[in-house]
Amino acid sequence: MTQKKAHLYLLCLTLLWGSTFPILKWLSDDISPALILWIRLGLSALACQFFFHAEIKSLFFTFPEFWKMVRAASFMGLAMFLAFCFQLEGMRFTTASHSAFITGFYCMFAALLSFLLGREKPQPLVYLAIGISMTGLYFLSISEHSFSFRWGDFLTFICAICVAVHIYLTDKYSRCYAINALNALQLWWMWLWATVYLSVYQHFSPIVYNPHFSKFGVSIGLLYLGIFCTAFTFWIQTLAQKYTAPSFVGLIFIMETVFGALFSMAFLAEWITAREAFGAALILAGLILSQIPLILQKKSQRVL
């Protein structure tokens, strides 16, 4: 796969991810986040197991390499499971468009992680990007009648940190292990965490909020999330990230924020105010700015 094709695949991935925001908002009004996650991740794990069963089986007896891959998949699965949890819980207390913009912070955090874990001091431009984006977050999330942030926006902010960790782990492990098997194992780990989450959640809160929900509509939504927006997109991400740099991945993934906001406006009629639009613009500007040092660094390495 060429780098250009990898970038195109990642762009299509962000379109699918962007479409999940209004669907998740709609589903979270009827059923609990724990149940959504359990079904979504179960469907995606089964789909990957069906398509890549032979590959996983052939690797099972390759000790100790297979068990190293299982451990790597557990780290990736835990990071993304926590991201899904915080995003879904946050969406109960904020709008889908807000969730889309704030989730986009993972692009900046991924760039920051790349610098910190690479044992390099972040460039001043990265600090400037953080300052601009945090200012944008203030204008986007501040309540109209009080100087306090929405609880849902805070949870989504934590989600962005978890996604950044997942991007770093995916970049690290996708270069070491078989991609299809790694992706399937990651999804099984996520489903395992979701099973524990659901078993605990149901003792403290109902798992169905609206007993008269449309079973057909919810089923279609969960199938779309599980098959297309989880199993398929995780496979594409794990495959494509192998052929490009984390800096370019972060830049392309910014489009998830744009697509998420557009889908939310189109299907949920979540129009944002002028103040929120200003905050969203600052966040996007900061996210793009945060990727510039990594791209320049990559170009300088090619020259050398």
Image: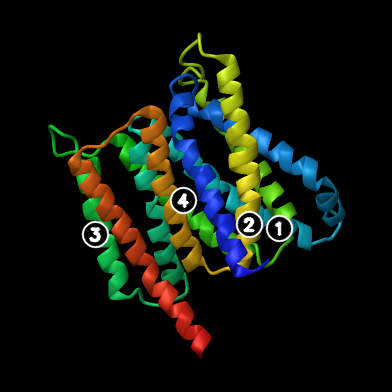
* Residue 276 location (% of width, % of height): 23, 42
* Residue 282 location (% of width, % of height): 25, 55
The residue at the point 35 percent across, 62 percent down is: 288
In the rendered view, tell whether residue 142 sits above or below residue 127: above
Q: Are marks 1 and 4 in contact (CB under 8 Å)?
A: no
Mark 2 Cα-neighbour bin, 10 Å: few <14, some 14–19, many ≥20: many
Q: Amino acid at mark 2?
A: Thr
**Label 2 to label 3: alpha-carbon separation:** 30 Å
Please tell me in which quadrant of the rendered image residue 294 appears: bottom left
Q: Amino acid at mark 3?
A: Ile
Q: Nearer the viewer, mark 3 or mark 4?
A: 3
Q: Amino acid at mark 1?
A: Ile
Please tell me in which quadrant of the rendered image residue 69 appears: bottom right
Mark 1 Cα-neighbour bin, 10 Å: few <14, some 14–19, many ≥20: many
What residue is disc 4 on? 162
Q: Quadrant of the N terminus?
A: bottom right
* Residue 239 location (% of width, % of height): 66, 59
**Label 3 to label 4: alpha-carbon separation:** 21 Å
Nearer to us in this view, 18 or 58: 18
Please tell me in which quadrant of the rendered image residue 263 appears: top left
The residue at the point 27 percent across, 56 percent down is: 133
What residue is disc 2 on? 238
Along the polypeptide, which appears first: circle 2 or circle 4?
4
